[in-house]
Image (cartoon, grey):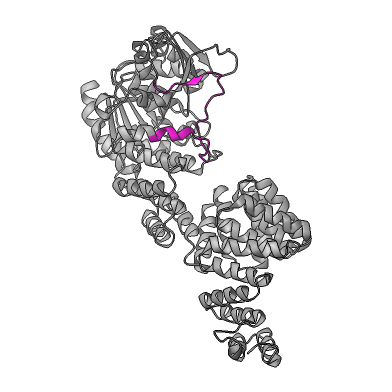
């Protein structure tokens, strides 16, 4: 039976379908759907009925029959492509939609459908081509501009995405999705207040829009408005409990609020929902901060297996392995820290016109070692510089920050020191190398760390000059209580880590009340040094730091002290490199270089570690330090 034989059945079914009764429409079409039926229009309409009621596999079979009956039925190819994509057969979906485009090249919606499938199946370049083909045919379609904006956002082309989304909004001002995508673009462009405004506008139009709540949380988080970020992400999850990205984002935020158990539970839930590189990596980060190194390493390995070229995962896995003492596998992965694909990388290769040293023979060659990251890193790894001469380097140069140059000039074996202030030309060398790549090039293991100290020295003139300004006799103890806050750093985890490693000057009060000890401040920083003024006048440590010009001066002060007590900052490394007794106060999720579960360190023989036993609890640490200081004080007084 065909529609020509009983046209009223087809028309009745079409009316029922148009009226929102797909099941009744399909029942009406039943006489037209026998095994030998070949009416493409009836088969197409029946397939639409089945797809609408959720029977997509059966719908696909009917569309295939419709196409067999009439190969040039473009909308059957289009419908088949869309349902095949929903069934997960991306290749077949793409093929069907390409047929539809070939049959109707001037129909914008067909290009639009193909673009969406190409985008979602991981073909962004082809998808962009189809979006632009559709726009060439129908430039006033706001949804096309919006979808193109979403694709451009995903490709990292955020300025172009902003333009596309703004055009969508111009055409359709109440388009919530376009306001959301605009907010996402502005977020990545660093225009955080503008992003927040766009996302709030999206939510006035569509209050239960989970994705907009998620993006709003990100805007708040980057503005360090943690309470608002947490609220927005909670809202996104309440609206969409399987929103893995919101779960993992909320989890990472909660770690900064020391709500570690909740954070771990959320990140585990995210992995259960969506076990991809992002969720596994973020669970690994939370586990790392909870000192569950074996589990963290396993998560990073799983994430790296999914995306073997991910620089961020390589770097996180490196930190986990190094913290566990697995230097053989950790150092090679540590090289990811300067990978161009790393978001917010702190280490950028210098623009030098000669080769990056990868371990080639240095006999008779010239090499420049390049500073990276913080002063503490330079102090720690400058121990390798004399060893380079032993490898036959004919000319060894070191590029360093100016505040360390005068101190570094005391290291043996360096032919030229170059301050990175633009005042000194850099001559031709055979190779260059980062400071923190030297352990890899020397094949360093925990057992072979070169720990002959001191390898940094204060000049005798500086030592005598500062000695005259320090108290005579008694036990002299230097104090540092905070690191560099770096609130504007692109990676929020950097400033978060500094908050965890830092405390306030008043935390030292149990020490400052101890008799017979002369305390000396080694604290620098506009806000942190000023905390001395919050202490009772009689208990304030001697503060000479306003007269300190550089680290050579600081080292001379330290040479006149009996002990340095410091949180994990550059001063910990400076004191260690000078061979002085140093007590390092380590946050619970301590830096990888201090390894785990030990109160000494192979990097500095005279160092002792006092680790937090609970996240954020410095009082218990200071109580142990006070007890240790009592045992030390009488013998030195």
454 or 416: nearer the viewer: 416
Question: Could you say where residue 601 lies in the image, as x and y percent from the top left?
Answer: 27, 30
Q: Which quadrant of the figure contains the C terminus?
A: top left
Name the quadrant containing residue 228.
Answer: bottom right
Name the quadrant containing residue 444.
Answer: top left
Tell me the residue at 39%/21% (across/down).
359
Q: Which quadrant of the figure contains the N terminus?
A: bottom right
Question: Could you say where residue 172 lies in the image, as x and y percent from the top left?
Answer: 76, 64
Left or right: 465 in relation to 518: right
Marks counted in the figure total 0
Magenta residues span 333-359
> Magenta stretch containing residue 336, yes or no?
yes
Question: Could you say where residue 592 lies in the image, as x and y percent from the top left?
Answer: 35, 36
Left or right: 378 in relation to 224: left
Mark yes or no: residue 513 visible.
Answer: no
344 shown above or below 216: above
Question: Could you say where residue 60 lies in the image, as x and y percent from the top left?
Answer: 55, 74
Q: Is the magenta stretch mostly helix, strand or loop?
A: loop
284 or 485: nearer the viewer: 284
Tell me the residue at 47%/56% (across/down).
250
Q: Which residue lies furthest to the front in this view?
A: 36
394 or 474: nearer the viewer: 394
375 or 614: nearer the viewer: 375
> Magenta stretch containing residue 473, yes or no?
no
Left or right: 206 in relation to 245: right
Mark yes or no: residue 59 visible.
Answer: yes
310 shown above or below 601: below
Name the quadrant containing residue 561.
Answer: top left
60 shown above or below 130: below
């Amino acid at each position: 039976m065909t529609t020509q034989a009983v046209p009223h059945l087809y028309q009745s079914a079409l009316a029922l379908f148009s009226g929102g009764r797909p099941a009744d429409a399909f029942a009406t079409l039943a006489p037209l759907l026998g095994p030998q039926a070949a009416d493409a229009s009836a088969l197409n309409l029946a397939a639409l009925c089945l797809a609408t009621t959720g029977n997509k596999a059966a719908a696909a079979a009917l569309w295939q029959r419709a196409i067999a009956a009439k190969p040039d039925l473009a909308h059957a190819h289009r419908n088949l492509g869309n349902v095949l994509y929903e069934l997960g057969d991306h290749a077949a979906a793409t093929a069907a939609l390409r047929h539809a485009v070939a049959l109707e090249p001037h129909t914008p919606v067909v290009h639009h459908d193909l673009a969406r499938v190409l985008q979602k199946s991981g073909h962004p370049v082809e998808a962009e081509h189809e979006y632009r083909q559709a726009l060439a045919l129908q430039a006033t379609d706001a949804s096309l501009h919006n979808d193109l904006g979403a694709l451009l956002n995903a490709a990292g082309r955020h300025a172009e995405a902003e333009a596309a989304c703004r055009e969508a909004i111009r055409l359709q001002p109440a388009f919530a999705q376009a306001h959301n995508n605009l907010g996402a673009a502005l977020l990545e462009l660093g225009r955080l207040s503008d992003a927040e405004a766009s996302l709030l506008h999206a939510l006035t139009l569509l209050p239960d829009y989970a994705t907009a709540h998620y993006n709003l949380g990100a805007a708040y988080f980057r503005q360090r408005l943690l309470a608002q970020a947490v609220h927005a992400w909670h809202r996104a999850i309440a609206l969409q409990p399987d929103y893995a990205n919101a779960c993992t984002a909320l989890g990472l935020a909660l770690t900064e609020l020391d709500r570690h158990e909740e954070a771990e539970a959320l990140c585990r839930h995210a992995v259960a929902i969506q076990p991809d590189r992002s969720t596994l990596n973020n669970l690994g980060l939370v586990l790392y901060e909870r000192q569950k190194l074996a589990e963290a390493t396993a998560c990073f390995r799983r994430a790296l297996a999914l995306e073997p070229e991910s620089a961020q995962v390589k770097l996180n896995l490196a930190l986990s392995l190094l913290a566990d003492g697995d230097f053989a596998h950790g150092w090679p992965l540590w090289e990811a820290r300067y990978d161009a694909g790393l978001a917010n990388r702190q280490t950028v290769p210098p623009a030098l016109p000669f080769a990056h040293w990868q371990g080639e023979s240095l006999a008779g060659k010239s090499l420049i070692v390049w500073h990276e990251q913080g002063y503490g890193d330079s102090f720690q790894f400058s121990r390798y510089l004399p060893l380079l001469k032993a490898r036959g380097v004919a000319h060894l140069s070191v590029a360093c920050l100016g505040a360390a140059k005068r101190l570094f000039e005391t290291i043996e074996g360096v032919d030229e020191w170059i301050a990175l202030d633009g005042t000194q030309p850099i001559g031709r060398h055979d190779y260059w190398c980062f400071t923190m790549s030297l352990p890899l090039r020397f094949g360093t293991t925990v057992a072979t760390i070169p720990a002959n100290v001191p390898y940094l020295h204060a000049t005798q003139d500086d030592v005598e000059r500062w000695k005259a300004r320090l108290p005579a006799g008694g036990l002299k103890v230097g104090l540092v209580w905070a690191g560099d806050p770096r609130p504007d750093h692109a990676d929020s985890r950097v400033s978060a880590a500094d908050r965890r490693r830092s405390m306030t000057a008043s935390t030292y009060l149990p020490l400052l009340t101890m008799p017979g000890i002369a305390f000396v401040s080694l604290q620098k920083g506009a806000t942190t040094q000023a905390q001395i003024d919050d202490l009772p006048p009689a208990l304030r440590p001697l503060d000479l730091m306003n007269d300190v010009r550089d680290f050579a001066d600081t080292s001379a002060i330290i040479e006149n002290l009996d002990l340095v007590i410091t949180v994990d900052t550059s001063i910990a490394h400076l004191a260690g490199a000078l061979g002085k007794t140093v007590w390092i106060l380590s946050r619970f999720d301590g830096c990888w270089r201090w390894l785990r579960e030990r109160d000494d360190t192979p990097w500095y023989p005279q160092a002792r570690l006092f680790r937090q036993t609970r996240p954020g609890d410095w009082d218990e640490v200071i109580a142990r330090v006070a007890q240790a200081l009592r045992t030390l004080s009488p013998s030195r007084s």
